[in-house]
Amino acid sequence: MELMEVESNRTEQHPDEDQQVQDTEPFPALIDSEEQIMTDAPNLRRRDPVQAASSPDENYCERTPERDRVLEKLRVILDLEDVPVPFWAFCQVADLQTLQGLVRQFIGAPDLTPLALQSCFAVPRLWAQKVPRFADYLSSSSESSSRSSGRSRRLPELARERDGGVCVLTKTALCDVAHIYAHCLIEPKKQSASDKCAPIIWTVLKLFWPSEKIARWKDTILPNNGQGEDGLHNLICMSPHLQRAWAEGRFALRPLRLSDDRTAMELEFHWLPVMGHRYDADIAITAPTLSTRGLDEVDNFFFYKPTGGRTGEKVMSGAIFTIRTPDPQRLPLPSFDLLEIAWHLARIVSMSAAGSRDEDGFSFDDDDDAGNHLSMPDKLIEDWIPPPPSPSSFASEIRGPHLNQSVAHQNPD
């Protein structure tokens, strides 16, 4: 049975990213029956992503004139030709009003500017190091299990039941249970001295998004006075190669809507271009971004629509997937808020080149309970925080770098 594509008759809406769009309008009518959608594939609705947009759409990493003006003000205030790449990446996706407030803070407290620029260094790397799997947890030692008493061993089973035992994107049975917000960031392991000098992720996010949004995000994953534990709201079934690509910023999933009865959620898929600069480089604050519009692969990394097979159409930026649950009380869908965090940070990982694994000084331990922990380089804090960027350190060239070879399909060319 083949699932027919569904075209949207709605006018495309692109709300400000500070506004959570959920429970506000019903899903569009579907051509196929509900039974067919539930049994064959997710509702995959395709816009025409190659059609020229009438105006820039920041969901496709197309910078608006409003953001251009704020970044130009920031360039003048900083009086720097270049800034660290991670700071540049945050500025491309930050809430615009909050970014304007950051500009005002820099005017009022210029001595804090270098600290703000360098505070962004750790967060994309921490996020990119997560390759979330439950397999290591299930096979870990009894000592590790005792440390994880707060995590239900039934969670993977329940997540698979909710998602039908298949990857929510490819609909293949070869899948793992992935964390949306990495477990290592919920329950950090023992830290080295330099680890403790790294800014807390929430402190950095507050520079770029409204405090009320940060509070809501944080309460979703750390509801008990900063203490968190896993739940189905933080889990999603995904094939191993897509898990890794997601963590490394090869694509992003934008949560669009949660149905009133909380049985269905729409996700918008975006491929993310591979950047040519290094994570530790500097770049002009006004350097352009790369649009995701029209992309159906990233450096030969791609996958087909669930109903297409090897001869079908490849999934393209802007494709809409619908994930569903048969029981929103017992088997709740992934959290809209956590997916929203992942949407922003996946793009930041991509733009900052934080997903690259060939740089020195960083470890990439698994994020589950095998006794490993994330670590920043064991060196002096003055070495970890580099000096303010010099005007001569411009590094904004964008070219086609190497993509990790763990791919869904790879063209022979």
Image (cartoon, grey):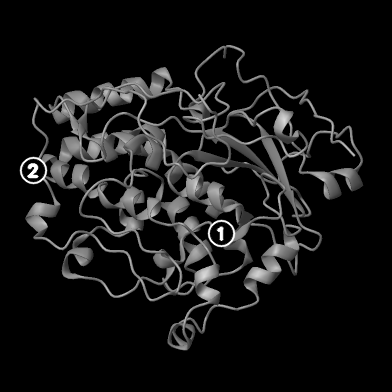
Q: Nearer the viewer, residue 128 or 31?
A: 128
Report the number of numbered marks. Answer: 2
Q: Are marks 1 and 2 in contact (CB under 8 Å)?
A: no
Residue at 29% x, 75% y is 190
* Quarter of the image where the N terminus is located: top right
Q: Residue furthest front?
A: 412
Residue at image position (84%, 44%) is: 37
In the rendered image, residue 144, in percent from the top left (x then y), is placed at: 44, 82
Q: Which mark is residue 350?
A: none
Could you tell whether 349 is left or right of 37 in the image? left
Q: Nearer the viewer, residue 403 or 117?
A: 403
Q: Is residue 60 left or right of residue 259?
A: left
Nearer-the-camera pick, 180 or 303: 303
**Image quadrant where residue 187 sits:** bottom left
Identify residue type, mark 1: Ala
- Say what amino acid the circle numbered 2 marks: Pro
At numbered mark 1, what does the secondary structure look like: helix, strand or loop? strand
Query: Residue at image x 19%, y 46%?
Result: 118
Depth order, front residue of 304/45: 304
Residue carrying label 2 = 387
Where in the figure is residue 173, as x and y percent of width and height? 71, 55
Instruction: Quickly name the residue at label 1.
Output: 178
For residue 93, say whether it is visible. yes
Give the distance between the C-alpha atoms of the residues marked 1 and 2, in whole angstroms.
Answer: 37 Å
Q: Say what secondary structure mark 2 lies in.
A: loop
